[in-house]
Image (tube, rainbow, N blue to C red):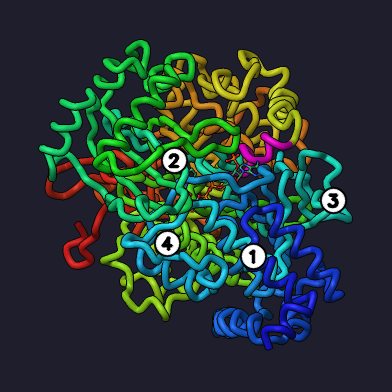
Amino acid sequence: MANQDSTNPSHDLFEQFVQAQTCKEVQRIFSELCHHLQVDPRDYQSFYTKLKERLNYWKAKSLWVKLDKRAQHQDYQQGEVCAKNKCLVLGAGPCGLRTAIELALLGAHVVVLEKRDSFSRNNVLHLWPYTISDLRGLAAKKFYGKFCTGALDHISIRQLQLILLKVCLLLGVEVQTGVEFKGFVEPSGATGWMAKLFPDNHPAGKFQFDVFISAGGGSFVPYGFKRKELRGKLAIGITCNFLNRHTAAETQVAEISGVARIYNQKFFQDLLTETGIDLENIVYYKDDTHYFVMTAKKKSLLKMGVIKQDFSDADKLLAQVNVDQEALLRYAYDAAQFSTGHCLPDMQFAQNHAGQPDVAMFDFTCMHRAENASLVRERKGKKLLMGLVGDCLVEPFWPLGTGIARGFLAAFDTAWMVRSWGKGRPHMEVLAERESIYQLLSQTTPENTSKKYSAFSIDPATRYQHVNLNSVKAFQVKNINIIYSFYFYSQYSVGAFEVLLKWCQQHTAGYDRVNVKDLNQSWRSGLALCALINTFRPRVIDMASLEESNAVYNNQLAFNFLERELGILPIMSAREMSFKGQIDKLSMVHYLTQIHDAFNERTPTKAPLSAPKVNPDPVNPDPEPSLMPGFSSNEECYFCCQRVYVLERISTEGKLFHRSCFTCHQCGTTLRLGGYTFNQHTGE
Ligand SMILES: NC(=O)C1=CN([C@@H]2O[C@H](COP(=O)(O)OP(=O)(O)OC[C@H]3O[C@@H](n4cnc5c(N)ncnc54)[C@H](OP(=O)(O)O)[C@@H]3O)[C@@H](O)[C@H]2O)C=CC1
């Protein structure tokens, strides 16, 4: 049998594919293998089956058994459920690739874009038990024999990418490296959503898709998604990697799963005395490299000359010009030496993707998380479902080791969303469900997720212990989608703001005391809004009776009309609009876009600019304004029962709150979504 295997070129190629250790090598051998077996990976729906038929020998079979087991899960409905969907995934980091695998199993046509052309991240990720079980199910051990054999559970980012890349390719996912996503090409009559790429003649630019998943990492978030900043006290992280030659002496050195100052003061005191290095904590993982990550105190970095000058602003403090690279290397080297008892022989820095010693210093004082995980865009009748996964969705706090675990949970949740999309569920329901699940993500720990790892699937109920798929309602995501739609649109359509401004100017021209020069400050007196209404509904407002100095009255008058007649909810109070220092442009763009959309289809009625009209009492409009379908008539804060405007509100558990009212019942601290528990019985 062994002889027969080694003489069969396809078996030999398959073995090389399984063992390949760089991204380029994997892609090259895969292409040779496909060529040799005469299977076309572009034929994504039958590619895996054909490959299996043609590679029907014992070594390959053990892999097929694993992948078949996964593919046969009921969630995928034998690859039928998303057979009509085309998905573009941005980023071939672990989260992008993991998502792509699920989308392929659902039967979708999947293309992954990655701007790097190599996998060069040495840094090592901590794995929760469920991720180990998940990766074993994808035959991780076959691709990487050392998978989780150490005393601790971890894997280098590049090894993880290699495993996932191989699975992706076998399942018919197209992975394009060395190509950067630059934005969207909106649908025309004949074509659907496409991507603007660099290089711009890249063939993936022709791919038309209805699902876009961004897994572009912490520094990439597609326009249209808003991020929240979570700021803690200054924390400076240092990562470094040393070559692992896998000698007996290196094997002897014990890993450090995490030692923190509060638990081992002596260790840190000795380190300080011996080296002058002052740390809060340190982790050491032995993987492809010897990987260290530590939190250093600013004072010691200044004292050791790593940081040249003290600044209160973290960006300035850690700016390249303010860091002495040689001193940083020394600092990291000495910390690594000390913490391994000087037992690692001949420590030499591994290289990063730029060919430099792999040492990085970063600020994790401030982390980001997206306010929502999904959006739907529609242009020319073509809908695009957008989702975020990985660091792009939630940046992890590395000492907790949550990055990849929560990253994979979000990948599954996103696949579940695409499944609902593929099933044709109304898109607001799809989004509401996705946002309901997203609220759980920041609370998840290995302890509060299900322990039945083998039963984990893309179905959230198999993973989260208490999942309520309806905690966010469809009407609540509606406003989020409207808010960002214009913003999003404007980023990719040259001059979209100008188009809106021109439209406003055109329809307010000629009115006394109205001069629209921009999309925010010119609207303060309320006269421009009233003028706009008067152009399209000439008998509603008596323009001549309005006074410029009575801004609250004018704004309230316009707000009332727009809400009652067109269902457009005010984004702030009339008082705020009149007196706020700077009117937020994005908020006004959102508001004016809705007015534009509501009036745009109608031809303005040519009427005298100041014909006598009867103004309703704006301060006391209809007691029960009839709202348009799709809008809630109950836009009150659950806690204070006051009106809650779109831009100041958050929603969870099917309720709305002012941001300022969403506080802990016990200590009064402002809470964030995902960082609270709700008592259904007391309503607190
Ligand atoms: N230092 C560390 O230890 C790091 C750890 N991680 C961890 O890795 C895990 C997975 O992270 P994940 O969310 O998958 O993100 P990753 O950062 O691993 O992957 C995202 C990939 O997308 C690429 N990319 C970004 N923008 C574009 C674009 N416009 N077009 C094409 N490609 C693009 C990025 O390239 P580029 O990076 O060049 O922008 C990167 O290779 C998490 O646990 C995370 O915490 C992630 C990053 C660093």
Taking the view exactly as shown, the residue that stands out farthest to the right is 190
Asked if the residues shown at circle 3 and circle 1 are in contact, with their CB atoms under 8 angstroms apart, the answer is no
Magenta segment boundaries in residue numbering: 484-492
Report which residue position mark 1 lands on: 166
Distance CA(mark 3)–CA(mark 1): 22 Å
Up-down relation of residue 437 to residue 38 (above or below): above
Asked if the residues shown at circle 4 and circle 1 are in contact, with their CB atoms under 8 angstroms apart, the answer is no
Distance CA(mark 3)–CA(mark 2): 37 Å
Earlier along the polypeptide chain: callout 3 or callout 1? 1
Report which residue position mark 2 lands on: 241
Distance CA(mark 4)–CA(mark 2): 39 Å
Q: Residues within 10 Å of mark 4 (few under 14, many from 20)?
A: many
Q: Give ligand 1's quarter of the image.
A: top right
Between tags 3 and 2, which lies in front?
2
SS class, disc 1: helix
Between tags 3 and 1, which lies in front?
1
327 with respect to 172 (left or right): left
Judging depth in this view, the residue of 305 and 408 nearest the camera is 305
Report which residue position mark 3 lands on: 203
Earlier along the polypeptide chain: callout 4 or callout 1? 1
Distance CA(mark 2)–CA(mark 1): 25 Å
Q: Write the residue at 22% across / 28% down.
A: 278
Let me know if residue 643 appears in the view.
no
138 with respect to 501 (left or right): left
Report which residue position mark 4 lands on: 436
SS class, disc 2: strand
646 with respect to 591 (left or right): left
Between tags 2 and 1, which lies in front?
2
Membership of 427 in magenta stretch: no
Residue 366 on image: x %, y %:
37, 34
